[in-house]
Image (tube, rainbow, N blue to C red):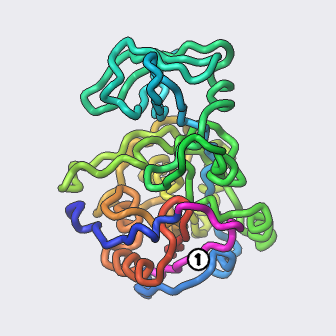
Amino acid sequence: MFISDFDFALPEHLIAQVPLEHRENSRMLHVDRSAKTFADEQFSNLARFLNPDDVLVLNNTKVFPARLLGQSETGAAVEIFLIRELGDMLWETLAKPGRRLKEGKRIDFDPRLSATVNEKRDDGKIVVRFEAEGDLDEIISDIGRTPLPPYIKREGSGTDSDRGRYQTVFAKNRGAIAAPTAGLHFTPEILADLRSLGIQIVEITLHVGYGTFEPVRAEDLTQHAVMPEFYEIGAAAADTLNTARAAGRRVVAVGTTTTRALESAVSKTGNFTEIKTAAELTITPGYRFRAVDALLTNFHLPKSSLLILVSTFGGHELIMKAYRHAVESEYRFYSYGDCMLIT
């Protein structure tokens, strides 16, 4: 298939710019793969569509404030977006305005933190070397700003109002530059209610990387690859998943990131083991899912790798039809938007 097969008309006003006041008030489109139908629901009714013996898998990665605002030596405003740590004090970044930043140029972010442009790459990325008076991670946590997707607009350098809301309530392990957004709908109360029904909740970690924002550059999807992302599945989580699968119970993934981690980790025989490595799997049409039986996911942008994954799981024709319905019904899209449950 081709990337053009995953295009649809998305009015700009449907890309949610702010979160709902209450996380659990999102709308939810339930897609039934067997019946090839979909129906409008509310996320707060999620339990109605889960079985008491399901295993619900969450991604407990924690977003760190990866946007740094600074000034060049000439006083010009510079924004650095941290993508990947390459070594001690060395980071791969995106920069605005990147064209003006020459190798060797200094950027000051704070009296405690500065950086020097180490390398400019052909793909537009810039490698910087930090100089910090104190612990680099602590300084970044102190002065950095929430790394919102480019589709969410914020004015200038005012209050970072997204820092608390662009984070799941179960976030634990720091390392993501984007939130696993399907998890943003959950509250402690909803998780407690699900546990009270007998649903097992398992946590794994996948640190969401720049690949979640990166556009698909290949027209032919056989040539498409998503950037690797670090993930970890602990021994207890692996045991729970193996027990569930042996008993024929459903594994319900919360988010495309959770799905990528589970499908990367499962063996050809359907088993899990404790693992800590990079997920290099790219899910495109023709992929056979071995780990995930149901998927909760947000609504994604046209021609995106996330839409390709969801469409591969739910079936291209059904998912694209559901997306057209979501647009017509004015569902809210992307990170702060509504969600879809595919069973």
Identify the residue at horizontal 46%, vertical 37% (top origin). Answer: 278
Judge by depth and name the residue closer to the eye, 294 or 91. Answer: 91
Residue at horizontal 62%, vertical 55%?
58
Instruction: Tell me: 307 left or right of 139.
Output: left
Please identify the residue farthest to the front as the structure is shown.
75
Residue at 42% over, 52% down: 268
Residue 294 visible somewhere in the drawing: yes
Residue 206, image x, y percentages: 54, 44
Find numbered disc 1 in the image and state the secondary structure of the residue it sits on: strand
Asked if the magenta segment contains residue 127, the reply would be no
Q: Where is residue 267? Give x, y as percent.
A: 46, 49
Tell me: residue 338, above or below residue 89: below
Give how far across and how far down residue 27 sits, in percent: 59, 77
Q: Which residues lie in the magenta part? A: 17-32
Reading the image, the residue beneath label 1 is 27
Instruction: Say which residue appears at 31% left-offset and 78% top-offset.
Output: 317
The relative height of residue 115 versus residue 285 in the rendered view (above or below) is above
